[in-house]
Amino acid sequence: MAKEFGHFINGKRVGGESDRFQDVFNPTTGEVQGRVRLADRSDVARAVEAAQTAFPEWAATNPQRRARVMFKFRELLEKDMDNLARLLSQEHGKILPDSRGDIQRGLEVIEFACGIPHLQKGEYTDQAGAGIDVYSMRQPLGVCAGITPFNFPAMIPMWMFGVAIACGNTFVNKPSERDPSVPLRLAELMMEAGLPDGVLNVVNGDKEAVDALIDDPRVKAISFVGSSDIAQYIYSRSAAENKRVQCFGGAKNHLVILPDADMDNVVNNLIGSAYGSAGERCMATPVAVPVGEKTAQTLVEMLKPRVEGLRIGPSLSEDSDLGPLVTAAHKARVSNYIQTAIDEGQECVVDGRGFKLQGYENGFFLGGTLLDFAKPEHKSYHEEIFGPVLQIARAANFEEAVELPSKHQYGNGVAIFTRNGDAAREFARKVNVGMVGVNVPIPVPVSYHSFGGWKRSGFGDTNQYGMEGVRFWTKVKTVTSRWPDDIQGAEFVIPTMG
Ligand code: NAD
């Protein structure tokens, strides 16, 4: 029987009121495996109400006890890893090792959040003036919301609720309607870890649920990760409601290859970073920028057989390089971009559009595709494709290689491969992109640094997780206090009990 996914409100799974549903697919077989109920405004209001009711007590819970819930959650997550990874792969389509990676990166943010007693400590100045002390504290904001994308259904909710809840906030997660199982399961595990009812809620839904969260004055902060047009919409609507807001958008990350780079290493890394997870990663590298003709020629010659030899398999496989795309609609979108690139004059070195996996002919599979001679004026280069497609944009020299990612509308991640420390340093300093890898293809910062892109990849002032996360999910209150010692008639006595 097909599964039905509702919401998680006030400590338990609930069905919800709305009669709108969306199908959830198994991307490997192409079959509908369930349907998710799309929340209406009353479902969202119930989740916010639960979070609002839970807030005062959770905010007053001492940070060490909040941290203990995170320690326990971490332990439960590790125990449930295989089950979670299977749930994730079956709905998303990424292969099991990628699903475990998704959960692991979220878990690392939970480990960071375990340090909240230390991270949330305030500051104190003794004797700022005669008899005056000044201290500041970081207080939680209240009910917070996270709107998350399909491509990391474990990691990105944990980036958000892990830090927000550790800081003393209560939370409503609105995950992607395409893969609802894992966010619901994470909420159950948080309860098992000792979180009080109402502190973490999950509402499944679409634009209606998102608009309801933005319009609700009880929601004090919104964090969003997804595509850029929606990021910009949520950013401007939430800011107009005077909410604290950060929105992270799409990407088109470049990997620059200088002539002195170790080409075996470059090709091995590119195969993983361009085609892994079927290219459905915001930190994938869909553009390679070889510098100089010889580098470009060698790159294409070495990449072609590797792309043709990619092992494509069902999402529950352990030993494939990639699985299917998330939906048939997304597969059609990626295929259209490949055609656009060809029409724009790019050379299709490997065309993955004809690929069919034997036994899974209705699955949403697309073979690895390699396109050469992409140019800045091409629509297919300018826009995000989000599939197993690598475009080569040749650069004549170092300056051009810095300029290509710097001038692109997106500025999430970028990488440079070289043996020259000077050139790498110059590149990292000059390039107009938020996260830079030096001989590292996917430079996702570790959990105690912070994650965030520039330009149309990031709207707002703060990054995800790390100290930036603690700052986003708290507000500073500063107290200036004076205890005069010359109040007339006052005696210096220390009050005692009874
Ligand atoms: P998406 O923008 O379609 O959806 C993201 C979220 O927004 C979902 O929860 C969805 O239900 C909601 N949403 C969809 N349409 C909406 C609308 N009209 N109004 C309000 N809310 C709406 O993104 P996706 O396809 O789920 O995820 C892929 C995208 O996310 C890619 O563009 C990828 O680059 C980006 N992404 C960015 C980062 C980052 O950190 N910058 C990380 C992961 C993914």
Image (cartoon, grey):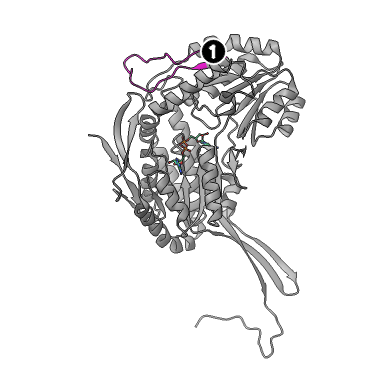
Whether residue 202 is situated above or below residue 271 in the rendered picture: below
Q: Residue at x 41, y 60 (%)?
A: 54
Q: Residue at x 38, y 26 (%)?
A: 328
> In the rendered view of the protein, which quadrant contains the N terminus?
top left
Residue at mark 1: 348
Residue most extreme to the front: 343
> Is disc 1 surrounded by few (<14), some (14 to 19) or many (20+) residues within 10 Å?
some
Q: Where residue 459 sits in the image (x, y, percent)?
A: 59, 44
Residue 355 forms part of the magenta stretch = yes
Q: Residue at x 71, y 72 (%)?
A: 132
Which image quadrant for residue 37? top left
* Residue range corresponding to the magenta coloring: 347-369
| Main SS, magenta residues | loop
Q: Residue at x 58, y 45 (%)?
A: 466
Q: In this view of the protein, which residue sits in the foreground, 189 or 11?
A: 11
Residue most extreme to the right: 422
Instruction: Tell me the element at label 1.
Output: strand
Residue 46 forms part of the magenta stretch = no
